[in-house]
């Protein structure tokens, strides 16, 4: 964080994902005074933070800028920021689909650009982020890795197009799991369990399973076997679930990745 603390970080957009990242970085040594946040509708969280420079003038050559607005507003957001494309400032973006070439067009071809796809569990230090940078960004990769590893894991993908799949898998993935929690609770409630109990048990089941998956060296397949008795209840449940789930998960990740491709055009 030393480089950012010295040179400053500009965050453009600070909603759900921006806040998740910023909270984690502040907890990991980023000084609030080093952060300038630009957001026309600052959240309550943002307005009540001390030290952060909210909607203050943007420094001329910050160490880095993070674009965390929706991709649909980039056409409005980027033009006023183009003076920051001086080759010294690292430009990072988490906007789904938005390609590195878009930022090179606005900030200049020599500008170091890193496109990242984090996910919401970064807010509790359990994020999963994929990153890809242009050639100019190579010396800056350690900064991006430090930032995203401060809030979870971070992998560099060898090909920018792979970020569409990263988006479909881990970027959007937490929502699939939340939808599964809802579906599990709803199904048990429909079958006769009191709703409150169904919700509590579904939440704790997915939290417990997630915590087991998070253990070092864990393997989902081995964990699944540990729950599944031969001829037992889990085997019966999985026989109903897995064929459809495999099919649906293929369609799900494909649909989300396809949307990321559409957003890139
Ligand atoms: N929410 C998630 O789980 C993830 C989101 N992302 C990406 O993060 C970006 C932000 O998503 P969310 O945080 O979910 O959206 P959000 O709507 O919660 O946050 C966007 C923020 O941008 C601000 N904003 C709007 N116009 C602006 C402007 N002209 N200048 C500066 N700020 C402006 C809004 O006031 C808002 O606070 C998106 O591009 C999304 O693709 C990436 C990974 C996961
Ligand atoms: O739904 C979206 O477009 C963003 C990108 C990944 C998660 N949320």
Image (cartoon, rainbow, N blue to C red):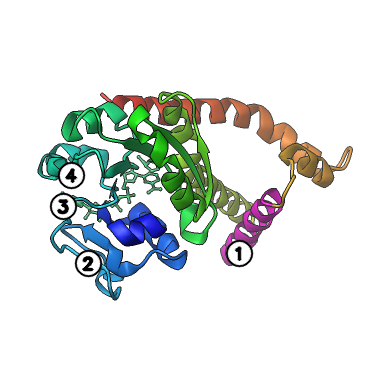
- Give the mark toward the camera: 3 or 2: 3
Q: Residue 200 carries which label?
A: 1
Is residue 185 highlighted in magenta?
A: no
Q: Position of residue 258 (x, y in %)?
A: 39, 25
Q: How far is the residue under mark 3 from the one under mark 2?
A: 15 Å
Q: Does the residue labelled 2 lie within 8 Å of ligand 1?
A: no
Q: How far is the residue under mark 4 from the one under mark 3?
A: 7 Å
State which tag comes first along the sequence, 1 or 2. 2
Under circle 4, the secondary element is: helix
Frontmost residue, 220 versus 146 = 146
State which tag comes first along the sequence, 2 or 4. 2
The image shows a total of numbered marks equal to 4
**Image: magenta residue range:** 193-214
Under circle 1, the secondary element is: helix
Residue denoted by label 2: 53
Under circle 3, the secondary element is: loop
Say if mark 3 contacts mark 2, CB within 8 Å: no
The answer to whether residue 99 shows anywhere in this view is no
Q: How far is the residue under mark 1 from the one under mark 3?
A: 51 Å
Say if mark 4 contacts mark 3, CB within 8 Å: yes
State which tag comes first along the sequence, 3 or 2. 2
Residue denoted by label 4: 84
**In this picture, is 112 found above or below 187?**
above
Q: Which mark is residue 60?
A: 3
Report the magenta stretch's main SS.
Answer: helix
Q: Does the residue labelled 4 lie within 8 Å of ligand 1?
A: no
The answer to whether residue 131 shows anywhere in this view is yes
Mark 1 crowdedness (10 Å alpha carbons): few <14, some 14-19, many ≥20: few
The residue sitting at 23% across, 30% down in the picture is 104
């Amino acid at each position: 964080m030393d480089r950012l603390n010295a040179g400053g970080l500009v965050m453009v957009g600070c909603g759900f994902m921006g806040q998740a990242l910023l909270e984690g970085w502040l907890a990991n040594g980023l000084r609030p005074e080093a952060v300038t946040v630009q957001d026309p509708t600052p959240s309550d969280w943002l307005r009540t933070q001390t030290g952060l420079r909210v909607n203050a003038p943007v420094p001329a050559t910050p160490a880095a800028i993070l674009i965390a607005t929706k991709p649909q507003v980039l056409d409005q957001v980027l033009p006023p920021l183009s003076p920051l494309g001086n080759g010294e400032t690292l430009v990072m973006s988490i906007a789904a689909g938005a390609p590195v070439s878009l930022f090179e067009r606005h900030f200049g071809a020599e500008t170091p650009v890193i496109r990242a796809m984090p996910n919401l569990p970064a807010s509790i230090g359990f994020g999963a982020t994929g990153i890809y940078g242009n050639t100019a960004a190579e010396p800056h990769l350690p900064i991006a890795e430090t930032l995203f590893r401060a809030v979870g894991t971070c992998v560099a993908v060898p090909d920018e197009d792979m970020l569409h799949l990263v988006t479909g898998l881990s970027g959007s993935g937490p929502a699939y799991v939340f939808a599964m929690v809802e579906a599990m609770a709803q199904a048990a409630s429909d079958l006769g369990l009191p709703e409150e109990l169904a919700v509590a048990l579904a939440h704790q089941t997915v939290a417990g399973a997630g915590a087991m998956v998070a253990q070092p060296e864990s393997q989902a397949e081995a964990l699944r076997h540990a729950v599944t008795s031969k001829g037992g209840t889990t085997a019966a449940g999985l026989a109903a679930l897995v064929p459809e789930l495999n099919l649906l998960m293929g369609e799900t990740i494909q649909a989300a990745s396809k949307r990321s491709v559409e957003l890139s055009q």
